[in-house]
Amino acid sequence: MPSVVTANRLDDGIVVYLAPGGGWSENLADAARAEGEDEVKALEAVADAAVRDRLVISVYPMPVEVKDDGTVDPISVRERIRASHRTTLTKDWYDVPL
Amino acid sequence: MYRYDEFDHAFVNERVSEFRAQVGRRLAGALSEEEFRPLRLRNGVYLQLHAYMLRIAIPYGQLSPRQLRQLAMIGRKWDRGYGHFTTRQNLQFNWVKLVDIPDVLAALAEVEMHCIQTSGNCVRNVTSDPYAAAAVDELEDPRVWCEILRQWSTLHPEFNWLPRKFKIAVSGAAEDRAATAFHDIGLRIVRGPNGENGFRVLVGGGMGRTPYVGQVIREFLPKEHLLSYVESILRVYNLLGRRDNLFKARIKILVNTLGIDKFREAVEADWEATNKAGIDLPEDEVRRIASYFAPPDLPEQPSRDEALAARREADPRFAGWYRNNVLPHRVPGYASVVISLKEPGRTPGDASSDTMDLVADLAERFGHDEIRVNYTQNLVLPHVARADIPALYDVLAEAGLGVGNNELLGDMICCPGLDYCNLANARSIPIAKEIAKKFEDPARQTEIGKLRVNMSGCINACGHHHAGNIGILGVDKKGTELYQITLGGSPKDDAAVGTIIGPGFRAEKVPDAIGTIVDTYVERRHEGESFLETWRRVGAAPFKEALYGAR
């Protein structure tokens, strides 16, 4: 199962994902995917440097599922919610399926 | 209400400058996150799931229109146009940027507000009865004592690093509307042996993973000794409370490990040795603080307003709202009005900036400039002339705020849960919304009657699930959100911790499970019997059987 590295941006706290090339994106689709322990460690090393550079905080890897169409989905409910950046102000019923 | 003096203004503004410098040092790299974290938490800044969250103290849940408008402005300018009222009578913004927070704190200071001690192992915002100075059953205004405790506890040098956080609630009425039995210290103003008012002091109540109902440490404490006695409780806790285990660090664990008698002995011994005169406030200072809480001048009016009576007769929707959301007032011709933040389909406790502005306007127009936050996550206008109630309702109804579900099933307490909170294991907001949808029909809720349904997205119990007549606790079971249901909890004078009724339910099954519980209650209740009375009479068996079948 592939993994991506996520964090919160230091200055505004927004959820971000480490992209190929070392940038950070709010969009999970842009995240760099790591297969296997070594690739995860390599991404984490890049992320740790970003922590030292005060770009992000609260860094960790998380497993994702790659769907048939190539898009990625977080495995856990928590990460699905984080990835959605959703607010709950709207008057609605379930807008993220349970 | 209390007004800052020069000292208060200077103190809060200094704190804003201090935090601005701390944020600057963090962004410049002079402070690591480990170093910065306790500093930001001391100013109410958490890192949550999506972003930083700012928790703003609303002392004893009281707001002026000017303050509420400022909160609305902050929501618009620095957040996403809404905030969340909490069970600590506070307001949380969910999306505020760290770089903006010093400006937000400065804007709060302009209206005599701050975020100090809304986090950390210190004395938190003191909560109280939202109907203070309005309720018919009130012995004495609890806000005066809340304010005295607030001033005493703010940056108290001895109690700034307690073993764990510390929550105090004060109620001055016959009915407990502040859940005092579920606080580290619960204070009930009661009549003493000689007819004078004093405090019944409860200690060691709390929710979380180890819920306890507070126990009486002193049946009657003369009012003038409040600070010295509370200080002795805190001193004993500070010395003996556990610091080696986060889950055993609250005072409730200490009280229940020692036993209330031994704990009392230790407190009384400390209190005996205390120089009370050096701590307790002089009478004239108590009087000075009390003068800020003089109730508004409300000239008596006829108790019966003909136009109001006619409207109740002619408009069933209005009549339904009135029945639940309009409460009696001590001055003839007035009422306290609950503005429900529980419109079906909306997140319980959330208010948009537009709503905040509207409520501020209504408080000025109809409510003698006072707004209260109830710990049940609604707003209250405590002083409204009965003759103004139809006009007030019309404005509320137009804005989607005319929901007449106060204290009914739809008036659920609900924590932010996994939609926002870093500690949560499961969502609570979507579950609350689905339950609200199932019971959307006001006639159905009226038929069921008063029912407290409380929901938390984790064991920390911010949604007070232990104290719900029906409590719902979200847990994570191997990656799936599962909901445990407890029955029989109560936050009131008959305070009780709910009992787990059986195995948990998957999210989509929860609304039907609540339906089954409600149906069982309605079928089994004797006439006029509350849910708790029925539960205590029939026990768990019929509810278990209805939920799980004969096993």
Image (cartoon, grey):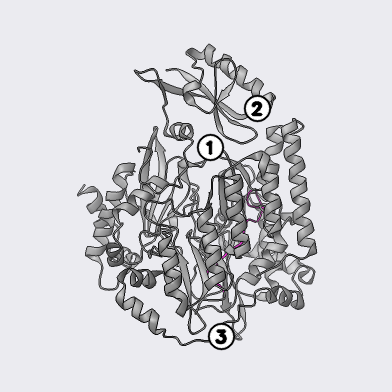
Magenta stretch, main secondary structure class: loop
Viewer-nearest of labels 3 and 1? 3
Residue A5 part of the magenta segment: no
Rendering coords of residue A43 (x, y %): 57, 17
Query: Which label's residue is closer to the chain start, 3 or 1?
Result: 1
User: Which residue carries the number 2 mark?
Assistant: A55
- Return the mark for residue B50: 1
**Circle 1 chain:** B
Labels 1, 2: one chain: no
Q: Is residue B360 above or below residue B94?
A: below
Q: Is residue A4 left or right of residue B147?
A: left
Quadrant where the N terminus of chain B sits is bottom right
Q: Secondary structure at mark 3?
A: loop
Q: Is residue B507 left or right of residue B262?
A: left
At mark 1, the secondary structure is loop
Magenta stretch, residue numbers: B117-132
Which residue, as the protein is rendered here, is positioned at the far left? B550
Q: Nearer the viewer, mark 3 or mark 2?
A: 3
Task: Give, as a three-letter code, the residue at label 2.
Answer: Leu
Q: Residue at x 76, y 35 (%)?
A: B25
Q: Chain of mark 2?
A: A
Q: Nearer the viewer, residue B92 or B243?
A: B92
Residue B24 in view here: yes
Image coords of residue B484 (percent x, y)? 37, 47
Callout 2: few (<14), some (14-19), or many (20+) C-alpha neighbours within 10 Å?
A: some
Q: Residue at x 61, y 21 (%)?
A: A47
Q: Which residue is mark 3?
A: B299
